[in-house]
Amino acid sequence: MTDEQGTSGAILVVGGGISGLTAALEAAEVGNDVFLIDRNPSFGGRVAQLNEYFPKMCPPSCGLEINYKRIKNNRKIRTYTMASVSSVSGGPGNYEVSVEVAPRYVNSNCTACGDCAAACPDEIDNEFNFGMDKCKAAYLPHEMAFPRRYVIAKDALSAEGGEAVKASCKYDAVDLDMKSETITLHVDSIVWATGWQPYAPEKMDNLNFGKSDAIVTNMMVERMAAPNGPTGGKIVIPGSDKEIESIGFVQCAGSRDETHLEYCSHICCTATFKQMNYIREQYPEAKIYVFYIDLRTPGKYDKFREKLMADENAEFIKGKVADIEVQGDGVTVIAEDAVSGAKVQQKVDLAVLATGMQPSIAESGAPAGVNLDNNGFVLSDYANGIIGAGCAKKASDVVTTTQSSTAAALKAIQVSRR
């Protein structure tokens, strides 16, 4: 067990996506010690998986690289990956937090040379690409991974694979005997920036996700559109090189539904319009169908929406999708047009489920002292230094997330300086 204690005023930031990075940097750059932890093997969160994000349609490197550099240059920030909070005790100004750090089976000698991956005979589903391709069981989490260090999925290694990766490393970085570690942190306040995850499409039986490669999620489209994605930037039917001539976007897939997520996830409509741009860049003549309840593009995104709704090859159907039927050469999206009352059956090459944003902490459960609302979002307790930030607090876009995280950092700083 390791005991870590910063100077008076130390802050723990749980979650290392764009929200956690922002909160950690804002607090550290005014002099507070910060512990930044993330359960994944690298920082960056969901933004790292996007092809582009609003408002400037930037690639992930636009926002993440500068933040990584700032963290590297700031000695006030101590980082831990593959780390999760197991317990919280104490109170504001005197929290004791137990953090479990899982083994990555690669130590700090790693130079990310890639020799272990080249030598490894074993493969796993690539989680970063939502299982649309494979990667080696010894792998770099993704192209922009920070820290830039490999990780080994030991459970997927064969005996032959274990010997191969150990023998391949000339830096003695592979340690298959590495154990989990418990770290005790002493902090004044805690910022919960645990982010979001796409709502599981398998839970919506009527949409038949997993029954056809032609039914994907909006985040899968982001990975396909990304140059470093599983298809090299080409939007196709996953598992094939088949190009598409028609595509159907199914809005509110799980959102605004008392059986699933009762709230609006805020970003799904703008994400669909963004992805229509991706389609147009690759398939100028493709037919696009958007099935929606309401189209919500707040404020500055209205003009973006108006431009795409003027697309002559795009049709917008106001109606909640009831079913997606799987056929041999495509899928058929079935909905009732809320305006005409007519039943619509539209066959498409690819159906995209605009799945909602579910707070990650809702699935994993909240440690002691953290209160969640009925939907699993963090309820901030400012007086006690328990503060929600970004999408852990509310479904939001990147701009709103960073604003929220700056505010969370300011609240944490106030607690530390009472």
Image (cartoon, rainbow, N blue to C red):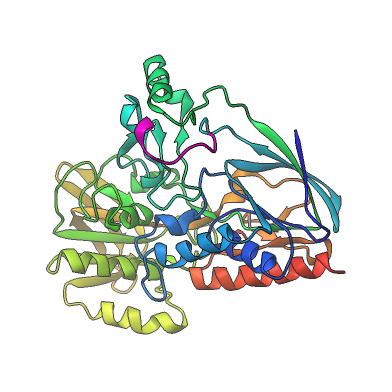
Identify the residue at image location x=49%, y=51%.
146
| Quarter of the image where the C terminus is located | bottom right
Question: Which sits in the foreground, 346 or 85?
Answer: 85
Q: Which residue, as the protein is rendered here, is positioned at the far top?
A: 159
Residue 108 falls left or right of residue 333: right
Q: Which residues are magenta?
A: 107-116
- Indicate the position of residue 270 as horizontal and vertical percent values: 39, 71
Question: Which sits in the foreground, 310 or 361?
Answer: 361
Location of residue 285 (image quadrant) = bottom left
**Residue 93, above or below 309:** above
Identify the residue at image location x=82%, y=51%.
95
- Indicate the position of residue 220 as horizontal and vertical percent values: 34, 52
Location of residue 213 (image quadrant) = top left
Question: Which sits in the foreground, 59 or 223?
Answer: 59
- Indicate the position of residue 39 as horizontal and vertical percent values: 58, 44
Give the total of numbered labels: 0
**Residue 91, above or below 62:** above
Residue 318: in sight, yes or no? no
**Residue 70, above or below 400:** above
